[in-house]
Every structure is written in structure tokens, then in C-alpha cells.
Amino acid sequence: MNVLLVEPNYKNKYPPMGLMKISTYHKRRGDSVCFYKGVMEESAFIKGAYDRVYITSMFTFHYDITVKTLNAYQEMSSPNKIFIGGIMASLMKDRLIVEVDEEVTILTGLLIDSEAIGFDDHTNIDVLPLDYSILDDTSFKYGAGDNYFAYVSRGCTNKCMFCAVPILEPEFCLTNHIVEQIATIISEFGEKQNLLLLDNNILSFSPSELKTVINDIKSLGFDKNTKFYPELPLIGYMRKLYLYEKDTPRHNNVLAELLDYLHEKQNTKKSKNYQAKYSQLIFSLSTQEDKFAFILQNYDAFHEILGYYHKPVGRRRAVDFNQGIDARQLTEEKMAILAQIPIEPFRLAFDAIRYKDIYIRAVNIAIKYGIKQFSNYILFNFEDTPDDLWKRLQINIELAKENNIKIFSFPMKYAPVDRTDRTFVGKYWNRYYLSNLSAILNVTKGIVADGESFFYKAFGKDIGEFYEILSMPREFVTYRSYFEATGQADEWKKCFYSLSPLDKNELINALCEKRESANKKVAKTLQFYKIKKNT
């Protein structure tokens, strides 16, 4: 059976783990598997003679590109050969049913039984190891890097209204045996430096269960002492090339990376003898039509030279509970268990100001056990006000200063899980405030660092000034220093503060609705919003 795995061509940080597990399943059946990001050319699709097409989906705001991708494959293949699953497909099945051919199979939730895709071996595909090899079929580079990606649990004991997990994974349970999972990855794809865990709530485990999980992680070399020593890149490239069929996209992509690596190493300092020998190898390589065959024939020579200068320095390993750690469930007992592994960064969620005391207590517990770097999620545009957001960010600034630690805040805009766009505006927010907050975060690349001076400049020295910045012309927010230097920021400020509360409300409404105003004072102020930075 020839299987095509497809990820729509949206930008995303993490590789398609569901497809990587499906690949493992089909390869164990003896099937041929290919991965493609986006829509394949029809000629290439026909040549591949694919018996099945699996399409993954991600966020609901990727709905349009996902359906467009699915429709493109429907036109090239029989709908009964197409399967679509993933987050968006699970959350929006009722809408998908209306838009796609009735013979397309829509998979919802976790793929825990292969019967759902027409096989009677009842394999739990969700617990299979990831097939990293499919990522070599594409030149797209995922932002999360070359890490171990894994789950040790599914679901969450909380039922937060803003979260899709209760719908996608309604039951909290232990799933993957991480030792077997990572051992398989090492044997097939080599060791990786860091472990990125995507569990929804690791602290939903009891202390005894958590201890078992942490002991497993430690046994894999993720303790406080074991260092990671990178292998010679030549070995990793050749491992893949031995496995991949020649002249396939997978083989060609890896070979191109290997050639770049070999040419790059020509510029590193070597002894006179080795330099001459290596230069001759590279020259000869450049003249070969079958470059892979030449590298195979001269592998020992390449390995001798490159291996002699490969002196890897031990690197610290890190475990990242990427979805965050629940401050409400962090206790001294559980923190003592977590502290046995190198968690970096330590991620906590601070979803509302009402959790202030719980959050601060959790930060202090983590600090007590040696945590010095935090990277924390700050939900906004849900049931919070702008005041609430500013206060939570300011609490992190103060905690970092008082404890001499690093806290990076990541404001995360809430969007309902049943919407196909990101235009939702929370009850206490408006479109213009959200637009200006986006402008602030664009400047900071989405991160609110822990420096006092930076924070108070970007977000205001108090809540009143924060509202001023949210009301400012967006161009003035983006190029703050420029417009302060020209004096236009001060001119706007004079106009803005001459407005009554009702006038200010009219100003914001006009900005949200992108219209003019009959109010003369507001109309005068609106002129500042048409100014663009001179380039």
C-alpha cells in the first residue's frame, strides 16, 4: 500500500505528531509512506499511485486552508481514500461533513484503535513512536527544533471553559511508556539533546504516579548531571541515507544537507596534510554525477578528517513541559519530584488575576527548589480586563526583580475553539485595544521580558498609562521613539487628554469601526491616526 501523509501549508512550530505515528503504523505493516506539506502537483500525485491520503488539521482558524487542501486532494483521488483528522477536524466535524464528500473519513479525537482507519488489528496508534524520517520529505523547518517530542499522558483533570482539551481528550490517563518511545527514536534516528513534553497537565498525576514518570525521564539521561555530547553530523546524515531509498525527496533533501555540511567544513582550520586531503575530496566530490556513491566510497576518509576535529563539548539537557505546569496543583511534594530533572524553562499559566495568590505561591515553591528561569503563559481577551492583564504582567516583573530570577511572560490571545477566525473580541476589550496590544507584542516578538525599564516603557508605568498606549495611534505605538522625537506623540497626547470620557469612548468606537466622527474634537484627534512614519 502506498500512503501519502499531508499537512496543509500553514506555518506551525511543531511537527505533525499524529501523522508521524500513522507513518510508524503503516511502515510496520510493510507499507510505503510519503509526507507532503501542502498540495502536491497532480503529476507527482498520479506517479505516486497513492492508495490512501491522510490529512492532518491544526487550529480552527486554519479551517479555510485545510478545507482547500482537502478539496484539492479530492479532485486528484477517490474521496473514499481520504482521511482527515486532528484538532480542527475533531472540533468542527459537523461543519466539515457539509463541505466535503460524504465518502471522506473524518477522524475525531485520539486514534486509539486502527479499526477507525479500516484495519482489524486494533492497534493503539496514539501510543506508537514518532517516525521522524517523514520530516526529511520536506524542506520546511519546524520552529520547535530537533528535540524528542512526546506525551506521557492525555487529557486534564480541569475543565477550563477556554480550553479545547476537555472536548479532544475528555479523560485524563497515562498513555505512552516514554522509555520505550525514546529508545525506539534513538535506535532509528539517533540521540537528541532535549525532551519536549506536550502533556496538558502533568500535575494531574498523583505524587506516586508523577515519581514513576520522573524516574523514567531520569533513566533516559535527563537528570541534573548527564550531559549531551552531539555525534559527528556525518554519522547522522549517513544513518538516514542508508535507510532512505535513493532519488526520493527524502533521500535528496538529506543529501543536499550533507553536501552543504561537507562544503562548510572545508573552511574550518586543519593541519596542512588534512587540509590538502580534504580539499582534494571536496574537489573530486564536485565533479561526481553520483555524489552519494562517491561519499560512500570515501566515507572512511571523510570520517577520519571530520572525526579528528569533532571535539564536542557536553551540553546541558533540558526537559520542557511545553503546555505549562498547573500552579493550582503545584505542591511542595510534587515540586520536590519535578526538581530531580532539568526543567527549563519552568512554565506556569497565570490565566486570571483571581489566581494571583496561587500563582505567586507556585512561583515561590519553584524558586525554593532551584528554578531560576520561568516562561509563563498569560491568557487575555477571555473574561479579563486590560487592567487584569497589566497587573499580571507587572506581578511577573516584580517577582523577577525581588527574587533575582528570569520570568518571560507570553500573553496569549483567547479565541473560541468553535471559530474559524481570530477576530473574537472579549467582553472587556475592543478591536482597537487588541490591535495596539498586538503592535506592542510585535515589537517584543510576543515576549514580555523581565526588565523593569523596558516593561514600564512598553506597557506604561501604571494602568492609566497602559490605557493611553492602547488608545494611541498604532503607528505611534510601533515607532514610539520616532514620534516622541518629532513631537507628534506629545501633540496627540494633548488632543487625547482634552477629550471628555464620552469623547474618548466615541474616539475608540470610531477607530474600531474605521469611520470618521461628527464630533469636532474627536475628528481633530482622529487626524493623528492617519499619520505614517516617513521612510
Image: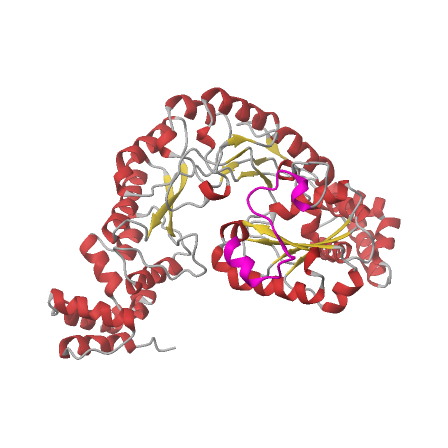
Q: Is residue 44 left or right of residue 370?
A: right
Image quadrant in which you'd find residue 282: bottom right
Residue 315 versus residue 493: which sits nearer the camera?
A: 493
Specify the segment rendered in magenta.
93-117
Q: Is residue 346 left or right of residue 153?
A: left
Check the picture and name the quadrant holding the C terminus: bottom left
Which residue appears at 33% of the width and 67% of the height?
A: 479
Which residue appears at 87% of the width and 54% of the height?
A: 293
Residue 488 versus residue 287: which sits nearer the camera?
A: 488
- Image coords of residue 350 (percent x, y): 34, 41
Residue 507 versus residue 327 in the image, above or below: below
Image quadrant in which you'd find residue 287: bottom right
- Image coords of residue 181 (percent x, y): 65, 33
Tell whether position 108 is magenta: yes
Can the viewer see residue 309 in this picture? Answer: no
Q: Is residue 321 left or right of residue 118?
A: left
Image quadrant in which you'd find residue 97: bottom right
Q: Is residue 124 left or right of residue 453?
A: right
- Image coords of residue 45 (percent x, y): 74, 63
Tell whether position 406 is magenta: no
Residue 403 versus residue 19 in the image, above or below: above
Can the viewer see residue 245 in this picture? Answer: yes
Residue 330 versus residue 33: which sits nearer the camera?
A: 33
Total marks shown come to: 0
